[in-house]
Image (cartoon, rainbow, N blue to C red):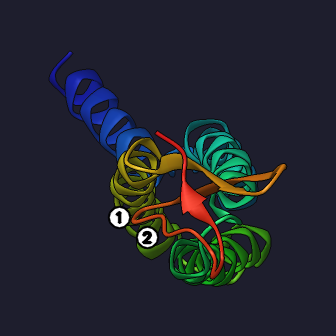
Amino acid sequence: MRKQKVIAGLVSALLVFSIAPAMADPASDRAATVEILKAKYVTVLDDQHKTLLALKEQMKVDPSLLKQVNAVLTDFDSNYAAIVNGLANENQELQPIKDLCEEEVEEFANSIYQLQQMVKSLKTITCVKGKTTKKIVALKPVCPKGYTKKK
């Protein structure tokens, strides 16, 4: 009886220590994480890009504003490309990409808010020269030479 207990204990110990734990497939785990990151961040970045393009259309009336929105769009495009390429590269670690996503989504949300405030501060004046009228839209609108501001 004692021998049976010892043998049963040894067999149990061998079974416990010889069984390897199940390992998750790193490729499928990475693919699932990439899909989560795309759903969480890339869709937000796509929406932010659409908003920036709409702001660019509104800011075409003022060269200084257009320059600012173009600078934000250039920064956006380079960071977006880094994120998309990092997610597509299977050798790239995902944590730096996730950190970049979080940082850039917040940064561009702030930039968009500031640009929207600038658009709200645009003023429109009407300038008259004889029977000709022009509407001028700018942060600080000024009538062209020869025109007077209509009251």
Q: Quadrant of residue 71?
A: bottom right
| Residue 27: x %, y % from top left | 74, 60
Residue 126 vs residue 81, the one in the foreground = 126
Q: Quadrant of residue 22?
A: top right
Residue 141 vs residue 10, the one in the foreground = 141
Image point 72% across, 77% down: which residue? Answer: 81
Q: Which residue is mark 2?
A: 100
Question: What amino acid does circle 2 point to?
Answer: Leu
| Label 1 Cα neighbours within 10 Å, binned few <14 / some 14-19 / many ≥20 | few
Q: Which residue is mark 1?
A: 103
Residue 1 vs residue 34, the one in the foreground = 34
Q: Which mark is residue 111?
A: none
Q: Quadrant of residue 102?
A: bottom left
| Residue 139: x %, y % from top left | 42, 62
SS assignment at label 2: helix
Question: What amino acid does circle 1 point to?
Answer: Glu
